Amino acid sequence: MEAKQAYEIVLHLIEEKDLNFTMDELAEKLKVSKRTIYQQFSSKANLLKQTIDYVFDDLLDNSQSSPICQLDNPHPSSLEILQQRLQAFPDIYDLDKLLRSSAAFSSNYPEQWEYVNQRLDELGSRVFEILLDNPQVRILTVTEKKVLLITLQQAIRKLVQGNFLDQRKLDFHDAILALNKILLEGILY
């Protein structure tokens, strides 16, 4: 059993059943025994944590190896890679599958939900670094940098909280694209 296959099936099960899937169901989908699963993952909580890493490691990967980084420019800048990833983010990455289960995560797996939030903060910090490395972004004061980082991290956390978007009749895809446009077009010269 490959870990990547297990993560992808876990994401599918989360999408299908929320976090209410059983390890028996996972074993059935993987066509392996539960014992095989538990040899690789000590618990369901451990499996969820590693699935979170799987989603975020791909998202935070700065290399061009990602299928969404097929740009015309053979040597794209960090900003071009960021733009491409943010535009493809809602369609490509499986983060939304995890996030739709935020209520279940926060009540049933609080440690894993806190870990999701830590990884979201990493995402905000990574976007922040890429923006500041861009020569088209004006020089920001120390205070502006702190406010921008807080704004990024809090905006990302809000957009992924359970029913936050639903209550405001916003779509995850549209909200991410709007954030992308505000970030990349709103602060550039």
Image (cartoon, helix red, strand yellow):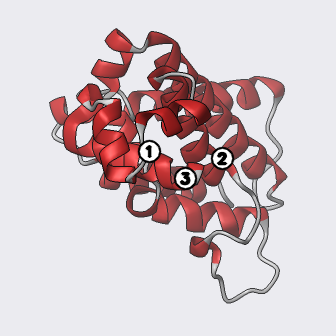
**Which is more N-terminal, label 3 or label 1?**
3
Q: On the rendered structure, is 151 left or right of 100?
A: right
Give the amino acid type for the residue marked by disc 3 in the picture: Met
Percent of width and height locating residue 127: 67, 46
Q: Quadrant of residue 75?
A: bottom right
Pointer 1 residue? 95
Foreground residue among 8 and 72: 8
Q: Residue at x 69, y 61 (%)?
A: 189
Question: Which residue carries the number 2 mark?
Answer: 57
Q: Which residue is mark 3?
A: 1
**Residue drawn where x is 47% and y is 65% of the image:** 88
Mark 2 vs 1, N-terminal side: 2
What residue appears at the point 65 percent right and 83 percent down from the top-left corner?
Answer: 71
Which of the labelled discs sits on residue 38, or is there none? none
| Disc 2 to disc 1, C-alpha distance | 11 Å
Is the Cβ of the residue at disc 2 closer than 8 Å to that at disc 1? no
Q: Residue drawn at (48%, 30%), measured in percent from left and top?
A: 48
**Disc 2 element:** helix
Residue 175 in view = no
Looking at the rendered image, the disc whose residue lies closer to the viewer, 1 or 3, is 3
Residue with the most extreme bottom position: 72
- Percent of width and height locating residue 129: 78, 44
